Amino acid sequence: MTEIAAGLVAWVGASLVVLSDGRRGLALGMAMATAGLAAIVWADVGPVPAVLVAIGGAAAAGRRLTSGPAGWNVMPGGSTPRFILCVAAGLLAAWVAFGVTGGHGPGLRFAAISVVGLSVARVLFTTAPETVLSGVSVLALAVATISEFEQGGAEPWPFLAAALIAAGASWIPIRAADAA
Amino acid sequence: MPPESILLSAFAALTLAFALVFAPRAVSRRSLAVRGGVGLGAIIAIAVVPNLDLALLVLLAIGVVDAASAGARGFGARLRAPVLAVGLLTLAGLLARAEGPDVLARFAAVGLGAGLAAAVGVMPYLHPVEPDRSQPWSSTAWLAFIGPVLAVVLVARGENLLGPDAGGVFGAILIGIGLLNVAWGGVAAWLTDDVDAAWRYSFIADWGLVLCGLGLTIVDGRRAALLLLFTIVVGRLPLYVASRLAGREKTVTERPINLVVAASLAGAAPFAGFAARILLLRSATQLAWPLALVLALGMLLWLPGSYRLGQSLGLPRGRTAAGILIVLALNIVVGLYPLPILGVARL
Amino acid sequence: MPSAAVLGPVVLPLIASGVIAAFGLARIDLGRPVAAVGAWSSVLALGVVWLTLRSSLELALGQLGYGSAFDLRIDAVTFAFGLMISIPTAVLLSLQPRAWPDSVLAMLGLTSAMAALEAGGVVLTAIAGGTAATLAMVLLDTEDPRAPRPSWGLLLAGWLALAWLGVIFQVSGGTAVYAAVPVTAVSVSAFALLAVAAVLASCLFPWRTWPAQLWSRPSLRSAGVVTATLYPLGFYLLVRGYELGGGRYPHAAFNVALAVIGAATALGAGARAQAAATRREFLGEVISGFGGFALIAISLGTPLGLAAGIVLLATAAAFVACLALLPDRTGIGSLLAVAAAVGLPPGISFGGRVIGIEATFEAGDLLGLIGIAGAAVWAVWMVGAARAIGLPGGRGHPANETFPRVAMAIALATLIAGPALALFQLGFASPVVAEVMPQSGIGVGGGVTSLVTVSSVLPVVSLLTPLLLIGVGIYLLSGSSAVRTQARPAIFALPTAGVERVRAAIATAAIPEQYRSILDLRELEAAAVGGRPVLWLAAVIALAFAVTR
């Protein structure tokens, strides 16, 4: 049950990343997605990978709080399609995770599918560098979480790599001229 | 780790060394070394990491670094294809490992095939065109530098994940995408107005054959794919770089060297491309001769475009000419006697 | 004799090309002498191996990496075709001046062509033949990029088709080695591929293709070498086809179809020749004409036909050297060349055509009709030759690359060699027949003085020697004063206007206005390279939909 709740938190966080154009909204979404994913990883894999995910996500969210368009700007005008996308992605992920697939970790599957889908969609349909990088950070953490399904169990390396990418992506300098 | 990936990493290092040694003096060696070094590091990382998830993270990282590097195109636009690739491959990995109906594994095969195409940047997932022509490497880095190792790693890992049924679907998807790229790349390289675009489409056409080879799932197909990747990394890429380095002052010429380069690009005998085509026809014949017929007809599309690309090199002089001769010689040696390379790759 | 001796005809010209290149880079031009040594040493090496052993010599050096071993062999077929390629090449390289890069390319072309002939398997032949084709393109381009040259696409298609045939044999028969391919693997579809490869490799078509076009180049240095090295290779494949099929083609339809193509090729060349505006144009069609007649004979599937084809090809090889060295001016040299080329008695060309046409009648059925067609085409050639004597010479290639006496000697040699037809057949063509049609015994019967066929005996010495003596006598009595050089009208005009109209219609064909928006390639390209995520996602959905079907 905890895992499912954590999955829902991750989905809400990824949805916030999709729905927000301001740095506060993006940072909150990243933080929620990180929290949800870290909680699932803690439950399914162990504390060390969870901490790595949490650190990476927190660093990314913290950086986002200090750079990018000011304010919350959650669901600005014309964002109805994005909202529908978030709901549809959640429903589809839930159907696949709980209805179609079986085995252990349904919450993890739900979180991974929804976060990957929404973060990729965010990157595909925006051009603002800060928003794109927010999506990349969340995507990196979600990619690491599926290593739990690796044969022989998950190792800490994907989580460490994901944390480094999530944090590093938020800090990477984008020259203004190139960020048109 | 697939031995082909180590071999292709070595080829990429060789090509980088070629560019550093044989580029004209006016080209910044430092910039070349930094960009090439980062790419080479990513290639080696993709080749040596122990599982698919780490490879995807490396792919994501190099995508971000590439998008953030110099270039007038939008950062977001440049990052789209790698992110889509990572997303599709991640979902494919998840579905392949999950318990459920057989169709899940088929969807995983779709994710792997489409993700591979998106990562490399072939049809229908062409990376946006680089409008800044002062950046000769960024536009083709995915196709010719990072792509080969990435493709080999993804196919090897993907085949491990998928069962026989989904493996067959994966192969069919690769062949389908491959044929699409053979047709598109061959015709577009021939008909497009822009020479730089023609070069890009020629890489795409080569990739079409590579994907067919990888999709054929028998050892001859893998051999053909490896030799074709060799021709991309150690043949087409350095020749493309030489063409770009020829600069604005270059004039389209029709010297013997241009024709020899055209022959090399077209996969004519005795260059490595011809040996690769023989192996590809052999593997296709073993599975379904109509496919071999389609491939044989498609292979004729290379010639008109290659003729034009060969001319675009102008009249190379000095160290560039020496470099081109070395590239051509390497391609001839491998074309006549590919066994050592195939042996190192354990194929 | 050690097996390594088979490397000689291939390696010696390769070494010569390396020497020429090394000295050339050091600004010392050794082109002509070293090329001559290299080419003649190839001839010598081939002759020594075959004439010493009179049987096959093979060298296998292990796998190369595409399912084929490095397997070379010299047998009767290699010997015959090797001489057809290497002797005219050697003559041209010995006499004509050329820059050292041209000499290097020509020697490499000779190396590739000899490797194609010595290759023990189909795949290796395809690689070597494809290399020869590539080098031919480069050689012609080096000499004059604007002059006519072969269609690279057609050549590549031919050798690619052969490569595919090789892998089909590897897959279905376990090997592509000529001597080891099971007859059951030589299916109708596989052989169709071989026939296509052969026709494309030598461009055996009724319309004007490179074997005729090359002779209209401003310089004939490279044209001669390219024709010498490339043109026989397609016929070589057809001869090897008999070996692959156990002495016959897998279906009689191939014999008929190829013979029809041959007749059409000879007729096309003859029609163009009789309407030629200059003598050079006429002579430019000679090789195509020989090719057509040789194809008729070779494709008949009988020992006599094959022997006739080999004789005609050998004569054509001699004419390659002759035409490249012949100056474009009126004189006894041109007269002899024209006479010998069209098969004036008692030349060997005459003898070859006679036994070729006789072979069609002996083969029976529809092939007899092809023999009648061949005779009619020959008549067209004879009339064309009579007209060509009075035509203007043509543009004229550089004097320093012409050697009128050598050209005349070659033409004369082919004319007076007619009485030696049986001897030539016995020593040169018959071993080829015995090699690829082992069921025929020693090939064509007879001795050094006559040819014995199924239906008749052709006493070539007693029949042709008097003709030769009569011809010499007439010439001695009248000299060349009896030769009238006024231009005469063509027998019939070529339908060039109609062809041009069709070509122009095809060239100007365009998509109808109302459909252009659907088939606009530029818009399609823009859509594909636009990096539109919607298109990408649609592609993913389409693939997902496809795999659930």
Image (cartoon, coloured by chain):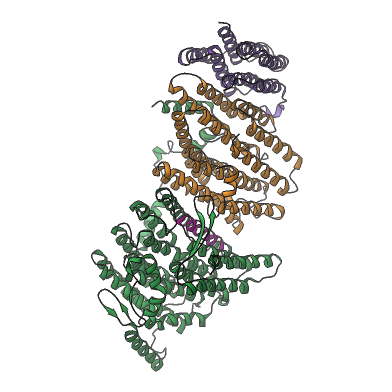
**Left or right: where does residue C511 sit relative to residue C372?**
right
Q: Residue at x 46, y 13 (%)?
A: A99
* Relative to B102, residue C32 above or below: below
- Residue B229 in percent (x, y) is at 57, 42
Q: Residue at x 27, y 67 (%)?
A: C363
The shade of chain B is orange
Does residue A52 belong to the magenta stretch?
Answer: no
Give the farthest residue toward the front. Answer: C1
**Left or right: where does residue B120 sit relative to residue B109?**
right
* Relative to B202, residue C86 above or below: below
**Left or right: where does residue C453 sit relative to residue C45?**
left
* Relative to B247, residue C276 above or below: below
The shade of chain C is green
- Residue C254 in percent (x, y) is at 32, 59
**Viewer-closest of B83 and A5:** A5
Does residue C124 belong to the magenta stretch?
Answer: yes
Give the farthest residue toward the bottom. Answer: C477
**Viewer-closest of B344 and C486:** B344
Quadrant of the snapshot with the C terminus of chain B: top right
The shade of chain A is purple
Q: Main secondary structure of the magenta part?
A: helix
- Residue B215 in percent (x, y) is at 48, 37
Query: What segment carries the magenta color?
Result: C121-139
Q: Quadrant of residue B287?
A: top left
In this view of the protein, can residue C64 be seen by the observer?
A: yes
